[in-house]
Amino acid sequence: MPSHNNKRLVLIGMLVSAALVLGYFERLIPMNFSFPGIKLGLANIITLMAVYMFGFREVMTIVLLRVAMTAFFAGTGVSFLYSLSGGMLSFLAMYLLVRFFRRHFSMVGVSVFGAAFHNLGQALVLGVLTGSLAVPLHLLPYLLVAGTATGLLTGFTALYFYNHVQKLPSRLFK
Amino acid sequence: MVRNDWFLLVGVLGLAIALGAFNLVRTTQVQGLAMQVVVKVDGKEVKTLPLEEDHEERLLTEHGYNVVHIEGGEASITDADCRDQICVRTRAISRPGESVVCLPYRVTLEIRGRSGEGGEVDAVAQ
């Protein structure tokens, strides 16, 4: 984890902007599924890398900034709630898994785990918004299957990307 | 990917299948009862319509409109002026627990089983 404050700030800023651009790119791709909440989740690539690079507070900052700024750019009130709950739950899940079982799972596994918790967060918000238990329960299986697929995709992408980041001179991060 | 990743992946998919099966079982338990379509706005019930009667109406909310369409024992939203149009693309629903959701307008259709004449909500379907 970078200790120097300025470098850390710059890195966090870069990761947030990368997440925003990925989110924008993702919205350009039409995803015509008949279920609400199914998406690629490209911003997960950034959260996942950040979990490996930084500590708890930095990653939380990145996730919260990304969710808040996405809401400014492209959000409705509802989509903000969705991504806040999904984003925070998946970050917490991935953080804990990496914190305690880092050597047992690869980034791909962590990504799939995080995606499942993202779906759980979405289902929770949907349950609260619709005031129903049956609605989220019926949607969740579909979300989980789609989330596993996109979790694999973002996991492999993050792994590939992170391997390159690690080849950068380490003084960049210290 | 390492071996544990696969365990995790199979675990998540297994959970999805188990939940899907659970939903299916719960759904078939209440089949045969008269069904109703519950229309909710902002999580509050505004209307219940019998599923066996063909019906169409424009549901106006503060955000815009959704056209609720019931035909041949299936309910759907056939038109709406919402941003993402997911509710319009969602396939028609007919079994308890199934739903059509319009997130931008916070409108949901939900199927419920109905027992007795008083329109008592079947506890299983809730």
Image (spheres, coloured by chain):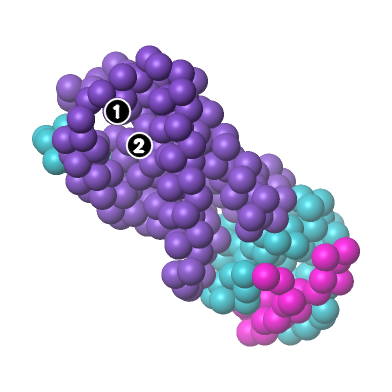
Chain colours: A purple, B cyan
Q: Residues within 10 Å of mark 2 (few under 14, many from 20)?
A: many
Q: Residue visible at 40% across and 52% down?
A: A42
Q: Are the residues flagged by discs 1 and 2 in contact, CB closer than 8 Å? A: no
Viewer can see residue B80 = yes
Q: Main secondary structure of the magenta part?
A: strand
Image quarter of residue A167? top left
Q: Secondary structure at mark 2?
A: helix
Q: Residue type at mark 1: give it.
A: Leu
Q: Are marks 1 and 2 on the same chain?
A: yes
Q: Position of residue B25 (x, y in %)?
A: 45, 53
Q: Residue type at mark 2: give it.
A: Leu
Q: Is residue B94 magenta?
A: no
Residue located beneath label 2 in the image: A48
Residue located beneath label 1 in the image: A172
Q: Earlier in the sequence, mark 1 or mark 2?
A: 2
Quick one: B92 or A49, which is closer to the camera?
A49
Q: Position of residue B31 (x, y in %)?
A: 56, 63
Chain letter of mark 2 equals A
Q: Is residue B72 magenta?
A: yes
Vertical relation: A103 (above or below) B119:
above
What residue span does the magenta drawing correspond to? B60-83
Q: Residue visible at 55% across and 61% down?
A: A36
